[in-house]
Image: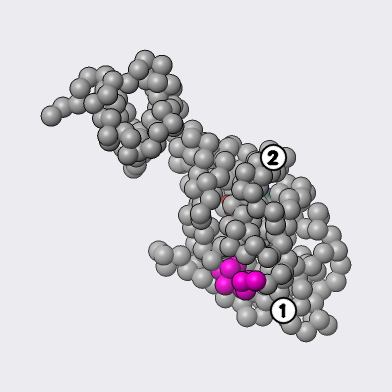
Amino acid sequence: MPPIPGSVSHHLAEAARRLQEGSDSARLDAELMLCHVLRCSRAWLFAHADDPLEPGAAGEFHRLLRRRLQGEPIAHILGRRGFWTLDLAVDASTLIPRPETELLVEAALARIGEGTHLRVLDLGTGTAAVALAIASERPRAEIVAVEQSPGAIDLARRNVDASGLRNVALRQGSWYAPVAGERFSVIVSNPPYIASGDPHLDHGDVRFEPRSALVAGVDGLDDIRVIVAGAAAHLEPGGWLMLEHGHDQGEAVRTLMATAGMGEVGSRQDLAGHERVSFGRLSPSPRHSGTG
Ligand SMILES: C[S@@+](CC[C@H](N)C(=O)[O-])C[C@H]1O[C@@H](n2cnc3c(N)ncnc32)[C@H](O)[C@@H]1O
């Protein structure tokens, strides 16, 4: 049976049809936007499919639909994105957290024993996604999260406050500058790692994300070089550095870590079999760790 004109299901079907070309999740996007307008669950939409959509809600739904048709990420339209077990506020000041970054969280958790009271540094925290995910799983660990962008640090603060977690401290500044003289047992980072000429920058969600969160020089490795170079001076002896990177950067990142004197260097693959996270360990002997 065709949907009743003006009903919830009619508006959804029409929106999904219009979104079909630009989105591979057209129906889901339409449902999420209508849920956002009506402040209801997706289950409610199914149960009330034949209800008329009142004009105010229809107008608001169509305003959101227009933004989505212009390519704006669904996470920006809703102002939220799920990551790990968290529901995070997002905006245009930083990266929308990606599911693949959960691999970085998993790799870090594997090095942070439950119940251990150790210090973790998250560089380029953005929404604070990685810092909060680790903090939620390891309540006795102390996480310091650094971010350069003033807009992103405000966003991170909102997320930290909303989480109720007390073991994340935010600091604004560039990479290691806000933690001069401090050492950590684990350093994690999902830094910018896209090459400046990468054609993917002209497609999809990344068009709406700041270049400062995405691009790192001609080969995409400029920020990773800085982070690897500073790691020895900020890791405890035997501490771990763990970095997310592009699917084709694993070998380059391992080489940078090995050249910097790190041991036990390796990478982890994502579900698609791409190297996504690389790690290295500072020598457990104090005389091999850097100074400063
Ligand atoms: C790829 S995003 C990652 C955001 C978040 N950690 C995540 O995984 O969703 C990189 C972040 O690094 C920040 N950033 C870029 N340059 C920085 C710098 N020099 N110092 C500190 N943060 C920086 C960006 O503003 C951005 O929030």
Residue 118's spot in the image, x, y percent? 72, 69
Residue 177's spot in the image, x, y percent? 81, 55
For mark 2, does the 10 Å Cα neighbourhood hold few (<14), some (14 to 19), or many (20 or more) residues? some
Given residues 232 and 16, the one toward you in this image is: 16
On screen, 49 above or below 233? above
Disc number for residue 259:
none
- Identify residue for label 2: 154
Instruction: Identify the residue at image location x=85%, y=71%.
Output: 291
Given residues 85 and 206, the one toward you in this image is: 85
Given residues 252 and 76, the one toward you in this image is: 76
Which region of the structure is painted magenta? 107-115
- Identify residue for label 1: 238
Instruction: Identify the residue at image location x=44%, y=31%.
Output: 39
Location of the N terminus (image quadrant)? top left
Location of the C terminus (image quadrant)? bottom right
Secondary structure under badge 2? helix
In-image side of 273 versus 107 (left or right):
left
Q: Is residue 37 magenta?
A: no
Question: Looking at the picture, which amino acid does disc 1 mark?
Answer: Gly
Name which of mark 2 and mark 1 comes first in the sequence: 2
Question: Looking at the picture, which amino acid does disc 2 mark?
Answer: Asp
Instruction: Identify the residue at image location x=76%, y=65%.
Output: 230
Residue 58's spot in the image, x, y percent? 37, 20
Q: Are marks 2 and 1 in contact (CB under 8 Å)?
A: no
For mark 1, does the 10 Å Cα neighbourhood hold few (<14), some (14 to 19), or many (20 or more) residues? some
Secondary structure under badge 1? strand
Distance between mark 2 and mark 1 Cα atoms: 33 Å
Instruction: Identify the residue at image location x=20%, y=22%.
Output: 4
